[in-house]
Amino acid sequence: MAAGNPWSAIWPEISLGCLALLLLVLETVLPRAAHGRIPLVSIAGQLGILVALAFNFDAPQRAAFNGLLMLSPHGQLMRAFFLISSILVSVLARHSLSWQRVPRVEFHHVVLVVAAAMMLLVESRNFVMLFVALETVTVGLYILVSYYRSNPKTLEAGLKYLVMGALSSALLLFGIVLLYGVSGSPGLAGRTGEAMQYAGLAGFLEANPNNFLAAAGIVLVLSGVAFKIGAFPFQIWIPDVYQGAPTPVTALLAVASKAAGFGVLLILVTEVFAPYAWLVGPVLTIMAAATILFGNLAALKQNNVKRLIGLSGVSHAGFILLAVVSAAREPMAIGAVYFYLYAYLIASFAVFGVMTVLAGPDDTEQELGDYAGLARESPFLAGVLACGLGSLAGIPPFAGFVAKLFVFVAAFKAGHFGLIAVAVAGVVISIYYYFGWIRMAYFDDEAAVSPKTAERARAGAGLTLGVALAALTLGSVVLGFYQGPLWSWVFGR
């Protein structure tokens, strides 16, 4: 593994940054009448970067910038994940922003910056780099969550996310400081210069497996990461923030931000904190069980669909945590995490796409009743919704079923039978509220869809969003039947 600092190692992140600057330049030099086409430039540019990344997917593993970053096959997989997420958020935003009187180009600019920061976040191998990348993501999300500033609930969501985000950053930073202090102490390790490197800290933890301050620092770091993934008991912000945020931003929080957190957590658990498995294992086990149960039980009584999808996302965080816990004993669990994230991306964006089409000017007040009779007004949107929800519920033949199966197999091999029982109970509970949503769209004959919702459903999603929704639905079905390339990639690396 060759060390070095070639800027070419982070060309996707640099490309996204340059594309973000290009959008601002185009807004300045082009006439106002042409500004509506600038988001298409963003989408086309991201697609070009994604294609270029696909041709460079088998790049060798190597360190960059003196160990600040690590380029790896799984890092490439997450780069593609964030690019796909960013593209889909941009597609949703083109539809959603058309209802609002807010700056449009700046929205796409911030999304690109956040996507690039997420890539750096999962490639970080240094706690300073980790914190800088994480704060870049967080500040961008502060802006995006409260972007519809004329809506009181959106402003409330932005304020709550700011307060809770500051708390989580404080926990994470305090944990990093404790780990730095204890591992950099000459009396203990004598390697102050290496204390912020993952490898240096891992070496200290292996040599000092029962240090109290190190254990406290690990718990605080895990707590800060748990906020990002929405795990219990750090999920309290999710319902209000998901409801108040613009729907494309809710999708970004639910999918990309959660995946970034799990990318970091997986590296910390398997590489850095492995000598403290006696602590990390029980903490994450309890967290996983509580997250699955809380998310599913809290979603049962929700009528607002954004709160429902947010709380169901909490339960999905619990399922992925089950795989992370299993990764300490079963290598297959690492692949299961990445496969689950991709299946979750496909299903979630399909659902969020339908929500975006039906939302209208105020997308904070979408209720289950608004979907009554959707199948009569738009069979296409109803079909996309049913496939997305079916995949989230883990129903065959969709990708979500295979993803949950992989997690269960990995947990079984790792011997986590109690967690499997909790997870199965969570799946059973989730079927109730997911199929309640589907029933509302297909079988609630007595309820009439509201005139506004009927009008939006008949108007359709438009060409760009319609193609994206069709591709997502097809991808969920195909990946449910045939895992071929993705299987070999995530399980063979």
Image: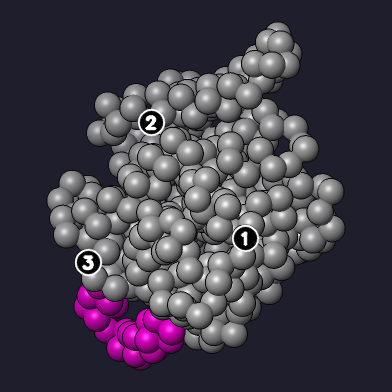
Q: In this image, 61 relative to 138: left or right?
A: left
Span shown in magenta = 404-432
Residue bearing the label numbered 1 = 451
Q: Nearer the viewer, mark 3 or mark 2?
A: 3
Q: In this image, 453 relative to 374: left or right?
A: right
Residue bearing the label numbered 2 = 50
Q: Position of residue 471 (x, y in %)?
A: 33, 45
- Residue 41 visible? The answer is yes
Residue shown at 18%/46% (left/top)?
485
Residue bearing the label numbered 3 = 397
> Which quadrant holds residue 217?
bottom right
Task: Choose between 386 and 187: the one closer to the eye.
Answer: 386
**Distance of mark 1 from mark 2, alpha carbons?**
40 Å
Q: Position of residue 224 (x, y in %)?
A: 64, 63
Looking at the rendered structure, the secondary structure element under dot 2 is: helix
Total count of labels: 3
- Residue 125 visible? The answer is no
**Mark 3 or mark 1: which comes first in sequence?**
3
**Distance of mark 3 from mark 2, alpha carbons?**
28 Å
Which amino acid, by three-letter code, is at mark 3?
Pro
Q: Position of residue 7 (x, y in %)?
A: 48, 21
* Residue 423 is a magenta residue: yes
Which amino acid, by three-letter code, is at mark 2?
Leu
Quadrant of the frame with the N terminus: top left
